[in-house]
Image (cartoon, rainbow, N blue to C red):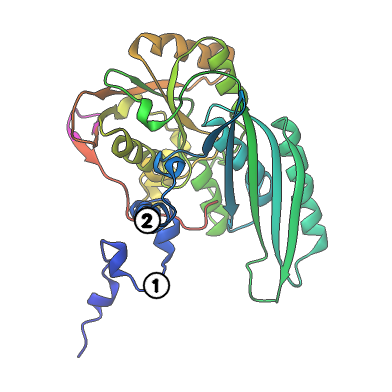
Amino acid sequence: MPNDNKKQQLPQLPGDYKNITMYHGSGGRLTHQLIENIFIKTFDSTELKRGHDGAVFNNQNNRYAFTTDSFVIKPLFFPGGNIGSLSVIGTVNDLAMCGAKPLYLSVGLIIEEGFSIETLKKIIHSMKIAADSADVQIVTGDTKVVEYGKCDGIYINTSGVGNIDHQLDICPQSIKSGDAIIINRDIGRHGVAVLSIREGLQFDTKIESDCAPLADSIITLIENDIQIKCLRDLTRGGLASALTELAGSANLQFSIDEEKVPISIEVNNACDILGLDPLQVANEGTFILFVSGSDAERALKILKNKLNWKDASIIGQVNNSSMNMVTIKSKLGTERIITMPIGEQQPRIC
């Protein structure tokens, strides 16, 4: 008889796969390998090789950031947002992670035949509200309709352009030994909020997505002369994927203190029940920033007092080591290595 267990084993390299799997789109190790071994290798772009959330380019005396993102979240509506608001905020935040002030967005819609016009109106209205809250204009777009059963309701692509009005080179390659790693808020809210609706779960306390625009916070830090080295919003794959990816790009070792990573009691309890690692759960309004050790306390004070990120915390530091890995010290004092997950614990999260 055939061994069914062999069919369930996950190959470790993308070359072992003959077809795309859900793991390839989840923001984990297979996504990273797919990008490195196919897209970057084929396009051979300097900006792609930087491993940033967007491309930064010069036009005469001005600097701009450009990014694009697609949203296939299921369900379309979740506590704290929906696919419309998420598509705007997700792209605005990618521009913010480049240190840019978002200016303009495009919107591409792929809609399934039979989709409710009333639901579409709600989604578009939420996009307008999100764009206004982020002070960004939606200026162009495209709509396509596909046959019934060929699309899961609606998919949205948004692309954005932002202006960079400073001289900082905010990218993974700017991270140096001795830098501090700071997070702006508690982790895991978006993933748990989406999963609670998808699986029909009810918790004692309602958990809402952290979906929120981040550009104003970044611009305020820069205007207060915080010399930001690198930024990353913690979307697919959560904190674990972001840290391991950046450690690889910077070729440095990061040390994290688990006690310093803010996690709400509600999210922590939900993750315990669901068997999820909070470090790997998606976020949509949470970011980490790297600053020099001498800037860390001042940056933290601005985040907490001026920007009202009450749970902001210095969670770790960058060490002078050629071993590009991430270690975390547990609450019991033991240390382990954080590895990038093969795929996310929850697909279709954004």
Where residue 30 appears, as percent x and y from the top left, is: 35, 57
Residue name at image x 77 percent, y 57 percent: 120
Where residue 9 appears, as percent x and y from the top left, is: 26, 69
Specify the quadrant that holds the N terminus.
Answer: bottom left
* Location of residue 197 (image quadrant): bottom right
Where residue 165 appears, as percent x and y from the top left, is: 60, 20
Can residue 236 be seen in this snapshot?
yes
Chief secondary structure of the magenta span? loop
Residue name at image x 31 percent, y 40 percent: 244
Q: In the displayed structure, would residue 222 be above or below residue 272?
A: above
Q: Which residue is mark 2?
A: 343
Q: Nearer the viewer, mark 2 or mark 1?
A: 1
**Which is more N-terminal, label 1 or label 2?**
1
* Location of residue 155 (image quadrant): bottom right
Q: In the displayed structure, would residue 303 be above or below residue 12?
A: above
Number of callouts in the render?
2
Where residue 53 appears, as percent x and y from the top left, is: 49, 39
Queried whether the magenta region covers residue 110, the answer comes back as no
* Location of residue 162 (image quadrant): top right
CB under 8 Å between callouts 2 and 1?
no
Q: Label for residue 19?
A: 1
Q: Nearer the viewer, residue 167 or 126?
A: 167
Give the alpha-carbon distance from disc 2 to disc 1, as whole Å: 15 Å
Q: Nearer the viewer, residue 288 or 56?
A: 56
Query: Given the image, on which type of amino acid does mark 1 rest?
Result: Asn
SS of the residue under disc 2 = loop
Magenta residue span: 328-335
Query: Given the image, on which type of amino acid does mark 2 rest?
Result: Gly
Q: Label for residue 293?
A: none
Q: Nearer the viewer, residue 330 or 340?
A: 340
